[in-house]
Image (cartoon, coloured by chain):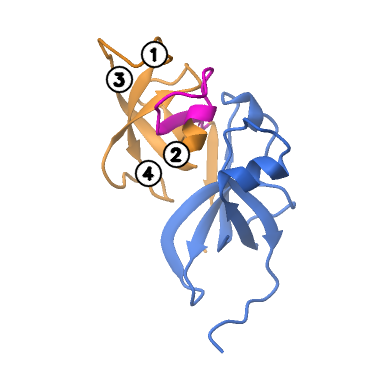
Amino acid sequence: MLLGRVVGTLVPCVIYEGLEGVPMLIVQPLDKAGEPDGRTLVAADATRMAGPGEFVYYEGGREAALALERTFVPVDHAIIGIVDAFHREEP
Amino acid sequence: MIIGTVTGEIHSTIGHPFYAGKKMLLVEREDGAGQRTGTYVIAVDTVDAGVGDRVLINEEGGGAREVVRSADAPVRSLIVGIVDDVQAGG
């Protein structure tokens, strides 16, 4: 999993069967220090509770769909949870 | 599997039920020469690792779900060992 910041929402007008009602959020990936790193992506929100500004962790690949209620759906990134606290020690 | 060093931890109360009560650690990856690559992964700890430990990470979903004995857990990265020593390139 990686850290990300929710920076927006996406509302589809047509979506593949099984993904109806699943929130789609725009996520900015973050590096190990919590700084923006790379291009934004669209992730399904498995928590259904994240929103813009939230600090989250997300997973890519097959495991992304496994986090959703319906697990055999075409999703490649999903928000798994919301970060409450993050501690890092500079080596 | 990959080798890395634990440099942080993540706490979360809202998340997928699989992660409830699991210890999630931030692990910085290292390359074949033991140098940090600058990239990281958040992995679930199964061996009681902590900040500063050099660890072995399984980064494949099938194996990870085998370890946690679940067919549908959304998990891929697991800390499965603490490294004492690595000898390479000899």
In the rendered image, residue A77, in percent from the top left (x then y), is placed at: 41, 33
Mark 4, residue position? A30
State the SS at label 3.
strand
**Which chain is disc 4 placed on?**
A
Q: Decide which of tag 1 and tag 2 comes sooner along the chain.
A: 1
Identify the magenta region.
A65-83
Labels 1 and 2 touching (C-beta < 8 A): no
Q: Decide which of tag 3 and tag 2 comes sooner along the chain.
A: 3
Q: Nearer the viewer, mark 3 or mark 2?
A: 2
Circle 1: residue type: Glu
Mark 3, residue position? A9
In the rendered image, residue B35, in percent from the top left (x then y), is placed at: 47, 72
Image height of B79 relative to B34, above or below:
above
Image height of A35 relative to A16, above or below:
below
Mark 2, residue position? A61
Left or right: residue B52 versus residue B35 is right
Left or right: residue A40 versus residue A74 is left
Q: Which chain is orange?
A: A
Circle 2: residue type: Gly
Q: Residue at x 25, y 10 (%)?
A: A13
The front one of B3 and A19 is A19
In the rendered image, residue A57, in percent from the top left (x then y), is placed at: 48, 35
| Structural distance between the alpha carbons of marks 2 and 4 | 18 Å
| Structural distance between the alpha carbons of marks 1 and 3 | 20 Å
| Structural distance between the alpha carbons of marks 1 and 4 | 31 Å
**Which chain is disc 1 placed on?**
A
Q: Nearer the viewer, mark 3 or mark 4?
A: 3
Q: What label does residue A17 carry, if any?
A: 1
